[in-house]
Image (tube, rainbow, N blue to C red):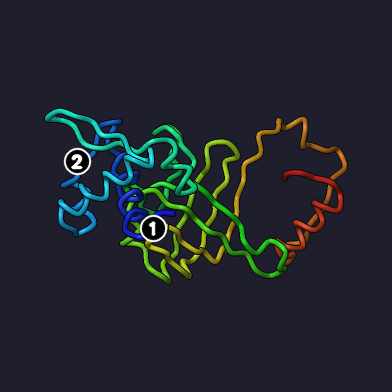
Amino acid sequence: MLTSVQKEILQTLINLYQNSDGKSIKGEDIAEVMNRNPGTIRNQMQSLRSLSLVKGVPGPRGGYKPTIEAYHTLNISFTDSSAKVPVYKENKKLEDVSVAKIEFTSVPHPGECEAVIKVLGSIKDLHVGDVIRVGPTPVNNLGVIGEIVGRDDMDNILLLDISTIRSIPKNSVYEIATLDLIYLKPGDSIKDAACLLSKNNIDGA
């Protein structure tokens, strides 16, 4: 069981490593981000190395790298830089910030849609009340828009009240097209349209 300080150090190391192009991270850099004494970081790194969560890299360009086990411990999927999921605030892409996981937490409750967003990178500039856009994800082209209603700095997690979910299917036009035309009225809501499409087994429009 990691202490809160160890979790924060490990999360900071992963955040920095994600944007380092594979270069090792110096303890001084971690200390600067966390606003802690470099000696404290070095002492904690010894414990994290004994737990096989951190690798030490010797030499003048040395430092620390997280192990795959470190990602698993913090419940982060290990991905390369080409699979980053972007985050946008006020239509501006946030540099050095990406999403590791999107988990919908209120699916059983009609009328509610909340999601827990696991973030790689600093979330200090993301505040409760901010509206952000996440995605698209690399596999399902999923994108969500929502208001931040909670923030957990320890685990680098944002809680979003989702207003929009978009997903672009990989199906071909032939797979989703139909000759049986379904009509909607201009005043119909998106919910009405979704119900009509679902009732007629139409996957896209």
- Point out the image quarter for the C terminus: top right
- Toward the viewer: 90 or 159? 159
Q: Which residue is mark 1?
A: 89
SS type, badge 2? loop
Residue 26 — which label? 2
The kind of residue tagged 1 is Lys
* Residue 20 at least partly seen: yes
Q: Position of residue 132 (x, y in %)?
A: 44, 59
**Residue at the image position 15 percent from the left and 52 percent from the top:** 39
202 w.r.t. 112: above or below: above
Q: Position of residue 85 (x, y in %)?
A: 46, 43
Residue 154 — which label? none
SS type, badge 1? strand
> Badge 1: few (under 14), some or many (20 or more) residues near its Cα, within 10 Å?
some
| Label 1 or label 2, whichever comes before in sequence order | 2
* Residue 18 at least partly seen: no
**Residue at the image position 72 percent from the left and 68 percent from the top:** 110
Tell me if 108 is positioned left or right of 52 in this view. right
Q: Quadrant of residue 114?
A: bottom right
**Residue at the image position 86 percent from the left and 53 percent from the top:** 199
94 w.r.t. 19: above or below: below
> Badge 2: few (under 14), some or many (20 or more) residues near its Cα, within 10 Å?
many
Q: Nearer the viewer, mark 1 or mark 2?
A: 2
91 w.r.t. 147: above or below: above
